[in-house]
Image (cartoon, rainbow, N blue to C red):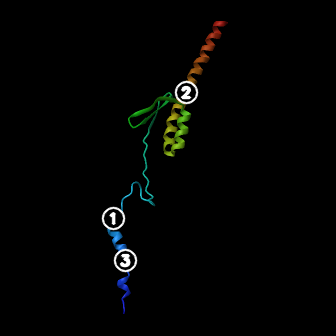
Amino acid sequence: MNVDTREDQPEKAAPAAEAGAVPEKRRRGRPKGSTARTTRVVELTLTVSGTADGDWQADLKQGTKWLARALPVSAADVSRAAAELHAELSGPIEEIIGAARAQRAARVAELEAELEQAKKALAELED
């Protein structure tokens, strides 16, 4: 009674092959162990504009919706924000603010000279 033991015991490779033949049920969501992330992009448009007199304002827009319009901001705040954002932004903005500052200083000098003339004229009238 010599019995071949290979026939009595099922092969271990067969169940594995059969399990691979049946497609695994898909699960919802990201597969475990996946490092892929969905990144949500938020697009904001910040527009900062100024006049030659040095008056600055800011507008903020998200898509087509305005979040803020014509908010007054100081030149110092614009300069500080540009420096914090990027060096390539701060250089040109500093030039523009510097030119506006020089223009304002010239206007102040003109007004001081005019004030001095008005004081002299007033002093002459009092004598």
Q: Residue 42: x and y, percent? A: 43, 43
Q: Residue at x 37, y 73 (%)?
A: 16
Does residue 31 lie above or below 93 as drawn? below
Q: Nearer the viewer, residue 46 or 93?
A: 46
Residue at disc 2, secondary structure: helix
Residue 106 is labelled as: 2
Q: Give the crowd class for mark 3: few <14, some 14-19, many >=20 residues within 10 Å.
A: few
| Of residues 97 and 81, the one drawn nearer to the viewer in this rendering | 81
Give the mark nearest the N terminus, 2 or 1. Answer: 1
Q: Name the residue carrying label 3.
A: 13
Q: CA distance from mark 3 to mark 1?
A: 17 Å
Viewer-proximal residue, 8 or 121?
8
Residue 51, image x, y percentages: 47, 29
Does dot 3 land on a helix, a strand or a loop?
A: helix
Which x, y percent locates residue 88?
49, 45
Q: Residue at x 54, y 27 (%)?
A: 104
Q: Secondary structure at mark 1?
A: loop
Label 1, on which residue? 23
Q: Quadrant of the C terminus?
A: top right
Task: Identify the amino acid type marked 1.
Answer: Pro
CA distance separating discs 2 and 1:
81 Å
Amino acid type at mark 2:
Ala
How packed is label 1: few (under 14 Cα within 10 Å), some, or many (20 or more)? few
* Amino acid at circle 3: Ala
In the image, residue 49 lies at what x, y percent?
46, 32
Residue 51, visible in the rendered structure: no
